[in-house]
Amino acid sequence: MALMDFIKKQFIDILEWTESGDGTLAWRFPMAGNEIQYGGSLTVRESQMAVFVNEGKVADVFGPGMYKLTTQTLPVLTYLKNWDKLFQSPFKSDVYFFSTRQQIDRRWGTTQPVTIRDRDFGAVRLRAFGNYAYRIADAKLFHTEISGTRDRYTVEDLDGQLRGLMLQHISDAVAQSGVPFLDLAANQVEFAQQLKEVTAPAFGKVGLALETVTVQNVSLPEELQKILDQKIGMGMVGNDMGRFMQYQTGQAIPEFAKGAAAGGGGVVGDAMGLGAGVALGQVMAQQLNTGLQGGGAAAAAIKPDDVMATIEKLGELKAKGLLTEEEFASKKAELLKKLV
């Protein structure tokens, strides 16, 4: 009985692989020096492929199905072994199973800003991230180019290489999309499609099919974010010059407050040049808006209360040491002339 058990262990009559869900892409059937029984069965499930390798060369590739291993189902291996049609014997061959299902939710992202060319700004720095999905499309090519003779090859083993391929083609995707950099955030679907098209050939060279690519976020560098904020602000005020002056005044408030907190005079001087701070900026906005509407009769439309309020605010700035006596006197005289 022990002798019969020993003999049975030398011949494998069933070859199959049940995936364990651990991210395995390629798995070598454990031969352990045994031989495959001629006439044995091979089961390849949906979302799998099997590859027979004889003496280091890929002999036969099987798609989903159940096969009886004979000279009819192993044509290339039969040719390599020079089997006669009536010669039936166990044979030795390495068998690899491959998972062809989609590997979803693989992440890509820029660890450092990527410099790209843009038609509006020339060279800009881009940060982006998203995910992608792929599958093994050519098991023979994947075996010869990637997994080789390893007992097991996983998704994690491949992630770094594929992520690098995605990042390598970002600049090409932006260029081919024709979408200006400032509009990329609003055109993520188009950007993702272009990224898929320019990257797919690189995946194909190693036996993979790039199925989907998504872009979840495109980050703007700080300096371009400021430009975008100004563009949005100008779009809101349109041709209303009064609202434009109010917008400019609002933009100046943070810098004015920063200078006041630091006790510096440079920012204050700039604020004086623009209209002696927020209060004077509001008066100038009223003047300009009234002048555009009234054909030069701006002075007559200024309210005395507004002028007096502005002088009071300037007095407060002088009391805090933010304005000199000469600056206060000069601006006060200018404002009082508006009442004449």
Image: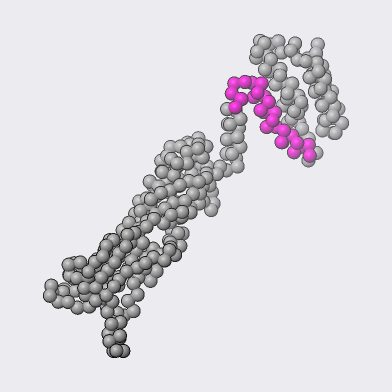
- From this view, report whether residue 18 is shown above or below residue 172: below
Picture coordinates of residue 80, whole percent (x, y): 19, 71
Look at the image and say whether residue 254 sits in the magenta stretch: yes
Identify the image quadrant of the C terminus: top right
Picture coordinates of residue 334, whole percent (x, y): 79, 18
Residue 285 appears in view: yes
Identify the image quadrant of the N terminus: bottom left
Which residue is nearer to you in this view: 23 or 120? 23
Q: Residue at x 32, y 62 (%)?
A: 45
- From this view, report whether residue 63 is shown above or below residue 236: below
Q: Residue at x 43, y 48 (%)?
A: 213
Picture coordinates of residue 183, whole percent (x, y): 50, 36
Q: Residue at x 16, y 73 (%)?
A: 82
Q: Seen from this angle, which residue lies furthest front?
A: 1
Residues shaded magenta: 236-261
Where is residue 20, by image quadrant? Answer: bottom left
Q: Is residue 228 left or right of residue 57?
A: right
Where is residue 141, by image quadrant? Answer: bottom left
**Count of numbered marks:** 0
Picture coordinates of residue 53, whole percent (x, y): 28, 70
Q: Main secondary structure of the magenta part?
A: helix
Q: Is residue 140 left or right of residue 274?
A: left
Residue 57 appears in view: no
Q: Seen from this angle, which residue lies furthest bottom?
A: 2
Look at the image and say whether residue 16 sits in the magenta stretch: no
- From this view, report whether residue 107 is shown above or below residue 311: below
Q: Residue at x 85, y 27 (%)?
A: 315
Which residue is nearer to you in this view: 235 or 336? 235
Which residue is nearer to you in this view: 46 or 276? 46
